[in-house]
Image (tube, rainbow, N blue to C red):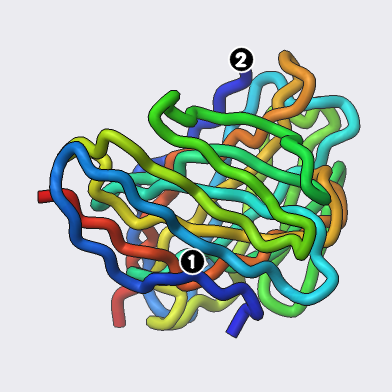
Amino acid sequence: LAKTTQPISMDSYEGQEVNITCSHNNIATNDYITWYQQFPSQGPRFIIQGYKTKVTNEVASLFIPADRKSSTLSLPRVSLSDTAVYYCLVGDGDSNYQLIWGAGTKLIIKP
Amino acid sequence: DSGVTQTPKHLITATGQRVTLRCSPRSGDLSVYWYQQSLDQGLQFLIQYYNGEERAKGNILERFSAQQFPDLHSELNLSSLELGDSALYFCASSASYGLAYNEQFFGPGTRLTVL
């Protein structure tokens, strides 16, 4: 069964760039890597998705190396409102179909 | 507002009881997912339905069951409740069943407290 690993927590300061890496040793060949953001007592919210190389949208960038065994979510110039838990989600290459969520990274942004 | 609705918002019950959580997906979405999130824990994927059929199964206990009805709403049934079942239960919906280009939209959750 595939497993994902994320740092439990990270701290940063307003205006800095934050990079959160998720390791996923056996994702499905055809599956994408997705990142979600969750605020306390709310459901997670989609941030970005990618398959390989680099994807960028209005809020984040996602870097995926050629071997796809990891991915890095990059948040440019964070603000206090970016304080949240960030999850990576990948498919499971071992079984027919599975949703493997990371344990989440609690990001705290300081003024 | 994600467009996904869940009822009830809060539920307090006793050990050994049975409860039903309800979810209405976004208009047009065919997939419904159920998740459990215990206090300060990550998301645990329970089960996914696509257009009425079970599509994927995660760490769902045998005491738990779910179904998706023809109108695409879904219910999660939790029976023989234990203290450890106290958690926030999220429902999510998406247009399709895979992960590619298939963003999940989460509801506000049902907070279950088992006393």
Place of residue B96 in the rendered image (x, y in percent of width and height, measured from the top left) = 85, 53
Please state, as top left, top right, bottom left or bottom right, where the N terminus of chain A lies in the image: top right
Q: Mark 2 points at which residue?
A: A1
Place of residue B92 in the rendered image (x, y in percent of width and height, measured from the top left) = 61, 60
Report the side of B8 relative to A48 (left or right).
left
| Residue type at tag 2 | Leu
Q: Could you confirm whether marks 2 and 1 are on the same chain? A: yes
Q: Marks 2 and 1, how far apart in space?
A: 26 Å
Task: Reply above or below: A103 against A19.
Answer: above
Q: Which residue is drawn at 38% across and 82% down?
A: A80
Please state, as top left, top right, bottom left or bottom right, where the C terminus of chain A lies in the image: bottom left
Report the side of B62 relative to B3 (left or right).
left
Q: Which residue is drawn at 58% across and 85% down?
A: B1
Q: Which structural element holds mark 2? A: loop
Residue farthest to the right, as pictured: A30
Task: Reply above or below: A49 against B26.
Answer: above
Classify mark 2: residues with Cα within 10 Å, few (<14), some (14-19) or many (20+): few
Give whichever of B37, B13 is nearer the camera. B13
Report the side of B93 relative to B11 (left or right).
right
The chain ID associated with circle 2 is: A
Quadrant of the rendered structure where residue B72 is? bottom right
Place of residue B98 in the rendered image (x, y in percent of width and height, measured from the top left) = 83, 43
The chain ID associated with circle 1 is: A
In the rendered structure, which disc, 2 or 1, sits on the residue that comes first in sequence? Answer: 2
Task: Reply above or below: A14 against B21.
Answer: below
Q: Are marks 2 and 1 in contact (CB under 8 Å)?
A: no
Q: Which structural element holds mark 1? A: loop
Report the side of B12 relative to A17 (left or right).
left
Disc number placed over residue A43 in the picture, else none: 1
Disc number placed over residue A108 in the picture, else none: none
